[in-house]
Image (cartoon, rainbow, N blue to C red):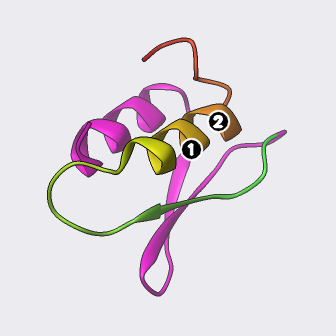
Amino acid sequence: MTKYELERLLRKNNFEQYSGGRHDIWIKKGFPPIPVPRHKGDIPKGTLKSILKTAGLETIR
């Protein structure tokens, strides 16, 4: 999954994006802040799994 696909999924699930240093921070009430790295190409599987788990979306992928 690319960064752009992940961003679309997070927006669809009502997360809001804030800019950080090397990562974008995604926030939604009731969830911890989720850092998403800014780079081209696919997000590494382990990183993606961790992000989806933190966002409560691990069953979607």
Quarter of the image with the N terminus is top left
Q: Is residue 46 magenta?
A: no
* Disc 2 secondary structure class: loop
Residue 53 location, quadrant: top right
- For mark 2, does the 10 Å Cα neighbourhood hold few (<14), some (14 to 19), or many (20 or more) residues? many
Task: Say which residue appears at 35% left-offset and 39% top-offset.
Answer: 6
On the picture, is 25 further left or further right than 28?
left
**Pick the front one: 54 or 49:** 49
Assess whether mark 2 and mark 1 are in contact (beta carbons under 8 angstroms).
yes
**Residue behind mark 2:** 55
- Percent across and percent down for residue 47 are 49, 50
**Pick the front one: 28 or 40:** 40
Q: Amino acid at mark 1?
A: Ile
Q: CA distance from mark 1 to mark 2?
A: 6 Å
Task: Say which residue appears at 43% left-offset and 36% top-offset.
Answer: 11
On the picture, is 23 further left or further right than 42?
right
- Percent across and percent down for residue 41 are 15, 54
**Pick the front one: 6 or 8:** 6
Position of 36 relative to 16 (above/below)? below
Q: Is residue 9 magenta?
A: yes
Task: Say which residue appears at 69% left-offset and 44% top-offset.
Answer: 28
On the picture, is 14 further left or further right than 37?
right
Indicate which disc residue 8 carries. Answer: none
Exactly how many numbered labels are in the figure? 2
* Disc 1 secondary structure class: helix
**Residue behind mark 1:** 51
Q: Amino acid at mark 2?
A: Ala
Part of the protein shown in magenta = 1-30
